C-alpha cells in the first residue's frame, strides 16, 4: 500500500473534537436547476464563536467556484484558497456576510450524495446526511452548526413541484417557461437536514389535527401513476403522529409535513426537517405488489423518520460520534411504536433476530466498535447495526432500569432543556440522572465498550431453608483496541416457574417483588437469593430480551421444552424453542462432520406436535406468533454459534431438519393450510389476517419441501398472482428452490406480470439470488447482466448483490467463485457509489470465521481490492478487516 493511500485515508478522532470557530446564523440559498448543471448561490451570515480566528475554513467537494463576495466585495484570488475539500477565506472579520456562487452537475452524481438527478423518476433530489451538503455549496458542514434556512428553487415547469424544508412562503412564474418556489424553515438546523426536490409527481393529501388543535397539511409525493400505493403510508404517518403525542408528548411543529418517494436513493429514508425523502420501497404498497412484511416495514420506517422530528431534528448531535443519540434513540422509539401498534411478542422477536444476525457478528468481528466509536475514516461507514440497533437496546435497558414513568420524565426534560441544541450522549445520560437520582456512570460503559457481554448463570436450591440462589458471572471478550473490559450494568428481567408451570412469588430480602422482577447486574460475579421458595423452580431469564447479551444457563432439554410450553413471557417461549432447535441443529452438523447417519430427536418433533396439534386449535391463539414459533434458526445464526462456521454442514443439517418436520407433520400442515387459506377475502392490513396469512404460508413452506406438494405451491402462486403479493412471494420462494420446470415457469410468469414495477422486479432478483441450487451462481451472474438490473440503482444492488451476499451456500462455494464475483462487483460499484460498495463488501470482511481454505480465498480477494484505487468507504472496511489481531 502506497504512502499516498495512507495519507488519503486519515482517521478522525473523537478526542480531537473542537467547537467550530465560526457559526452560521442564517443561510439564503438559491438553486437554479438546468438540464446539464445547477447554479447555487448561498448568502451566509457568519459570526465568530467565542474566539475570533482570522481564517474561515469551509467544506466543499466537487464544486466549481464561480465567485465569492465578502460584505458585498468580490474577493481576489490571493484572499482565499481552494483545495479539493476546502475553501479557506483569509482574514475575515468577527461578523460578516459571505456570498458564494458555485456550479455543480447533478446528472453526473452517481454517488447519490448531495444534489443529484434520480434517473428512474426524472427527479432532482438531495441526500445530505452525513456530509452531502458540501457537494452542493461551500459551508461549515458539521452537525453542531445550526442555521435558519431560506431556500429558493428555480426550474423548468416540467418540474412542477419545487420542494424544500419548512413552510412555503412564495412561488410564481418566471420567463422562459420557468418558475420558482421559496421555502422558509423557522427552526435552526444543521445542513445535513437540508432537502430539495424538483420533479413531477402524483400528490396524495390529507390533514392531521394535533393535540393542541393545530392543523397540519400532510402530503406524499410519488411517481406518476402510483398514487394508489400511498394510502398505507399516509395511514402509517397519522398513526405515528398520534402515538408520539400520546407516548412521548411530542407534537408536530410546522404547518406542513411532506414525504417524497424516490427510486434512486442510498438510504431507506431521510428525516430532513419537514421534507422527508424516502426510498420508494418504504412508501409504496398495495396488496398486488407488497407483502405483509412490506406493510410492516413501511409502518416502522414512516414512524422512524417522523419521530426524528424531535429525536434528531429539534435536538441534534454535536458531532457524528454522537450518532446513536439520534439513531439509537429513534430506533428505540419506532420499535416501541410497532410493538404497540402490532404485536409486542412478534415485533420483539423480529428486532432481536435482526440484532443477533447483524450486530452480534459485528461485535465479534474485526469491525467491532462501541455504540459511540472513538474514530472513523469514512463517516458513511458509521451507520452500523451497533450504532442503530445496539444503541436502541441501550435505551431500552435504560427505560427498564428507570421505569417507564421516570424515563418519560427524562425524555420530556431532554427535549425541553436541549431544544434547538446540538448535544452529546453525556448530555442525554445526565438528564436521566437528574430525573432518577441514580448515578449512571457505570451504565455509560455501554456507549464506550465494544463487544457483546456474556453472562453465565448457575443456581442452587436449598429445600431445607427454602432458598433459591442464582449465581451470575459476566465477561466481555476482547475487541480491536479494547483488550480488557469493565463489568457492565445489565438488567435481567426474570421470573420463576413451579413444576406445574405456574409463576412463583419472588421474595428478595424478605420483601415481596411480585411475579416478575428485574435484577441489576453490576459486578463481575454476583448472586441473588430468593426466600420462601417452596419447591425447586425453573428460572425464566432475560425476559423480553432485557439486555443485548449472550446469556447461558445450563437448561436441560426437558427444561427448555417445559419453558417453551409454559413460560408466561411470549418472547422467552420463542427463545427456548430456538435454543432447543439450535442444540439439535448443532448436533446434526457434528453428525454430518463425523459421517454419521442423521436422525431427528423425538423431543424436538414433540415440540412441533404440541404447537400444531394443541395451540393451533385454540380459538384465541396468536397465529402470527405461532408462525414465528415454527421457524428454525437461520443458517447465519447457527453459524454464529460456531468457532469456525461450517457452511456446508449447517446447510445440510437445516435442510434435513426442515424436511423431516415436513414429512412428520405433512397432514397436519395441510389441514392448517386449508383452514386458513381463503381465495376470495380481500387483502387487509389487519393483525388477525396477517397472522392467518403468516401461519398458512409457514405451513406451505414446509409442505413445498415435499415433492407431492409442489403443485400446491404452484396453485397458490397462480391464484395469488396479480392479487396478493404475500401469498405470491411465499409460493415463488418455495418454487425457486426446486429443480423443476415449475421453477422456470413461475419465475417467467412473475417477471412478465411485474416487469414494469421496479419494486416487484427487485423481489424477483432477490428471490433468485437466494436460490441454493447447484447452478445458482451462474444464474446470479446472468441476472447481473440482465436488462432488469442496473448497478447505478441502489435498490437493484441491494436486491441482487445484497441477497447473494446473504446466501451462504452459494457465496461460500469452495472454489472461491462467489468471492471473486463479489470483489469484482465491489470494484466496479466503488467507482460509481462508494456508500453502496462499502455495504456490499461486508460479507468478505468476516473471513476469519471460516475454514482455512475459505479464509485464504477471501483474504486474497480483500488484499487484491486493497491494492486498487479505493474510496475511503471501502478502504476503511477492507483495511480494518485485514489488520492483525
Image (cartoon, helix red, strand yellow):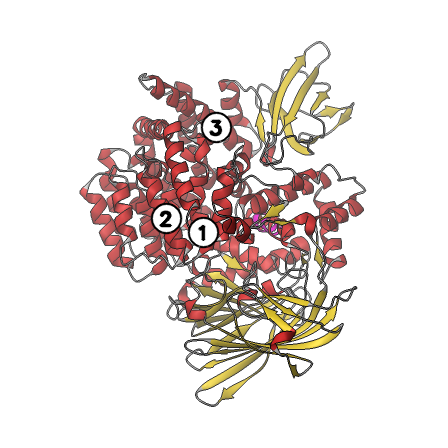
Q: Tell which tag, 2 or 3, sits nearer the viewer.
A: 2
Crowding near pointer 1: few (<14 within 10 Å), some, many (20+)?
some
- Which residue position is annotated with label 1? 870
Q: Helix, strand, or loop for circle 3?
A: loop
Please state the horizontal and vertical placement of residue 806, each as a whole percent of the image: 39, 41
Looking at this view, is 504 or 247 the one in front?
Answer: 247
- Which residue position is annotated with label 3? 641
Q: Which mark is residue 710?
A: none
Q: Helix, strand, or loop for circle 2?
A: helix
- Which residue position is annotated with label 2? 801
Question: Which span of residues is magenta-colored?
Answer: 329-335
Please state the horizontal and vertical placement of residue 291, each as a whole percent of the image: 39, 51
Q: Is 777 part of what is drawn in magenta?
A: no
Image point (25%, 37%), residue name? 774
Q: Looking at the figure, which quarter contains the C terminus?
A: top right
Q: Is 333 part of what is drawn in magenta?
A: yes
Image point (55%, 31%), residue name? 572
Amino acid at each position: 500500500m502506497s504512502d499516498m493511500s495512507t495519507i488519503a485515508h486519515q482517521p478522525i478522532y473523537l478526542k480531537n473534537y473542537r467547537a467550530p470557530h465560526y457559526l452560521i446564523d442564517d443561510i439564503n440559498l438559491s438553486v437554479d436547476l438546468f438540464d446539464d448543471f445547477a447554479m447555487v448561490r448561498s448568502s451566509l451570515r457568519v459570526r465568530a464563536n467565542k474566539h475570533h480566528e482570522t481564517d474561515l475554513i469551509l467544506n466543499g467537494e466537487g464544486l466549481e467556484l464561480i465567485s465569492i463576495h465578502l460584505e458585498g466585495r468580490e474577493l481576489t484570488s490571493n484572499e482565499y484558497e481552494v483545495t479539493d475539500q476546502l475553501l479557506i477565506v483569509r482574514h475575515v472579520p468577527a461578523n460578516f456576510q459571505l456570498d458564494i456562487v458555485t456550479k455543480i452537475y447533478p446528472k453526473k452524481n452517481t454517488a447519490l450524495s448531495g444534489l443529484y438527478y434520480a434517473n428512474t423518476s426524472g427527479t432532482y433530489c438531495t441526500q445530505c446526511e452525513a456530509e452531502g451538503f458540501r457537494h452542493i455549496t461551500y459551508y461549515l458542514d458539521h452537525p453542531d452548526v445550526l442555521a435558519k434556512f431560506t431556500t429558493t428553487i428555480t426550474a423548468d415547469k416540467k418540474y412542477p413541484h419545487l420542494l424544500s424544508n419548512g413552510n412555503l412562503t412564495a412561488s410564481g412564474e418566471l420567463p422562459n417557461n420557468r418558475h420558482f418556489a421559496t421555502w422558509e424553515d423557522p427552526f435552526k438546523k444543521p445542513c445535513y437536514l437540508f432537502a430539495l426536490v424538483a420533479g413531477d409527481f402524483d400528490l396524495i393529501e390529507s390533514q392531521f389535527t394535533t393535540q393542541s388543535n393545530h392543523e397540519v397539511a400532510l402530503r406524499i409525493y410519488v411517481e406518476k401513476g402510483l398514487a394508489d400505493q400511498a394510502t398505507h403510508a399516509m395511514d402509517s404517518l397519522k398513526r405515528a403522529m398520534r402515538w408520539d403525542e400520546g407516548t412521548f408528548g411530542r407534537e408536530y411543529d410546522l404547518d406542513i409535513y411532506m414525504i417524497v418517494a424516490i427510486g434512486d436513493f442510498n438510504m431507506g429514508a431521510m428525516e430532513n426537517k419537514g421534507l422527508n425523502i424516502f426510498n420508494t420501497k418504504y412508501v409504496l404498497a398495495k396488496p398486488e405488489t407488497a407483502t405483509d412484511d412490506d406493510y410492516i416495514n413501511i409502518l416502522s420506517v414512516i414512524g422512524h423518520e417522523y419521530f426524528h422530528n424531535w429525536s434528531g431534528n429539534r435536538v441534534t448531535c454535536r458531532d457524528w460520534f454522537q450518532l446513536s443519540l439520534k439513531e439509537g434513540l429513534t430506533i428505540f422509539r419506532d420499535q416501541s411504536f410497532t410493538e404497540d401498534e402490532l404485536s409486542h411478542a412478534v415485533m420483539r422477536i423480529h428486532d432481536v433476530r435482526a440484532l443477533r444476525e447483524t450486530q452480534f457478528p459485528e461485535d465479534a468481528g474485526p469491525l467491532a466498535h462501541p455504540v459511540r466509536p472513538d474514530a472513523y475514516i469514512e463517516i458513511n461507514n458509521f451507520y452500523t447495526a451497533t450504532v442503530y440497533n445496539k444503541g436502541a437496546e441501550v435505551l431500552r435497558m435504560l427505560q427498564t432500569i428507570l421505569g417507564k414513568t421516570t424515563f418519560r420524565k427524562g425524555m420530556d426534560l431532554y427535549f425541553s432543556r436541549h431544544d434547538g441544541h446540538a448535544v452529546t450522549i453525556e448530555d442525554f445520560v445526565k438528564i436521566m440522572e437528574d430525573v432518577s437520582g441514580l448515578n449512571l456512570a457505570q451504565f455509560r460503559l455501554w456507549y464506550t465498550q465494544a463487544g457483546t457481554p456474556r453472562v453465565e448463570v448457575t443456581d442452587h436450591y436449598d429445600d431445607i431453608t427454602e432458598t433459591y440462589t442464582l449465581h451470575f458471572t459476566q465477561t466481555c471478550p476482547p475487541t480491536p483496541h479494547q483488550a480488557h473490559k469493565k463489568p457492565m450494568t445489565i438488567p435481567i428481567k426474570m421470573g420463576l416457574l413451579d413444576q406445574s408451570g405456574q409463576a412463583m412469588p419472588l421474595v428478595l430480602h424478605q420483601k415481596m417483588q411480585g411475579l416478575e422482577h428485574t435484577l441489576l447486574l453490576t459486578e463481575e460475579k454476583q448472586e441473588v437469593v430468593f426466600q420462601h421458595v417452596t419447591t425447586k423452580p425453573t428460572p425464566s431469564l432475560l425476559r423480553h430480551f432485557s439486555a443485548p447479551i449472550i446469556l447461558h444457563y445450563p437448561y436441560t432439554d426437558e427444561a427448555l421444552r417445559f419453558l417453551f410450553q409454559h413460560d408466561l413471557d411470549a418472547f422467552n417461549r420463542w427463545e427456548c424453542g430456538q435454543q432447543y432447535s439450535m442444540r439439535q441443529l448443532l448436533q446434526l452438523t457434528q453428525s454430518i462432520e463425523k459421517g454419521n447417519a442423521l436422525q431427528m430427536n423425538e423431543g424436538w418433533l414433540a415440540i412441533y406436535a404440541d404447537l400444531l396439534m394443541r395451540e393451533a386449535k385454540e380459538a384465541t391463539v396468536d397465529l402470527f406468533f405461532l408462525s414465528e414459533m415454527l421457524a428454525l434458526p437461520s443458517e447465519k445464526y447457527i453459524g454464529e454459534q460456531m468457532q469456525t462456521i461450517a457452511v456446508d454442514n449447517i446447510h445440510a443439517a437445516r435442510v434435513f431438519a426442515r424436511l423431516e418436520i415436513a414429512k412428520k407433520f405433512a397432514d397436519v400442515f395441510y389441514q392448517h393450510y386449508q383452514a386458513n387459506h381463503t381465495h376470495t377475502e380481500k387483502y387487509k392490513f389487519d393483525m388477525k389476517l396477517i397472522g392467518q396469512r403468516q401461519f398458512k404460508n409457514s405451513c406451505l413452506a414446509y409442505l413445498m419441501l415435499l415433492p407431492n406438494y409442489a403443485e400446491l405451491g404452484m396453485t397458490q402462486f397462480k391464484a395469488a398472482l396479480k392479487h396478493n403479493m404475500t401469498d405470491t412471494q411465499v409460493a415463488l420462494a418455495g418454487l425457486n428452490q426446486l429443480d423443476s420446470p415449475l421453477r422456470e415457469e413461475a419465475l417467467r410468469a412473475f417477471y412478465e406480470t411485474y416487469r414494469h414495477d421496479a419494486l416487484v422486479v427487485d423481489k424477483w432478483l432477490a428471490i433468485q439470488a437466494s436460490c441454493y441450487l447447484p447452478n445458482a451462481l451462474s444464474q446470479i451472474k446472468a441476472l447481473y447482466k440482465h436488462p432488469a438490473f442496473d448497478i447505478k440503482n441502489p435498490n437493484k444492488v441491494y436486491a441482487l448483490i445484497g441477497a447473494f451476499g446473504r446466501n451462504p451456500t452459494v457465496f461460500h462455494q469452495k472454489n472461491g467463485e462467489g468471492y471473486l464475483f463479489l470483489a469484482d462487483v465491489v470494484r466496479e460499484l466503488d467507482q460509481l457509489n462508494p456508500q453502496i460498495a462499502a455495504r456490499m463488501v461486508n460479507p468478505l470482511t468476516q473471513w476469519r470465521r471460516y475454514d482455512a481454505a475459505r479464509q485464504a480465498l477471501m483474504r486474497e480477494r480483500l488484499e487484491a481490492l486493497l491494492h486498487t484505487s479505493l474510496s475511503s468507504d471501502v478502504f476503511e472496511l477492507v483495511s480494518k478487516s485485514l489488520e492483525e489481531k
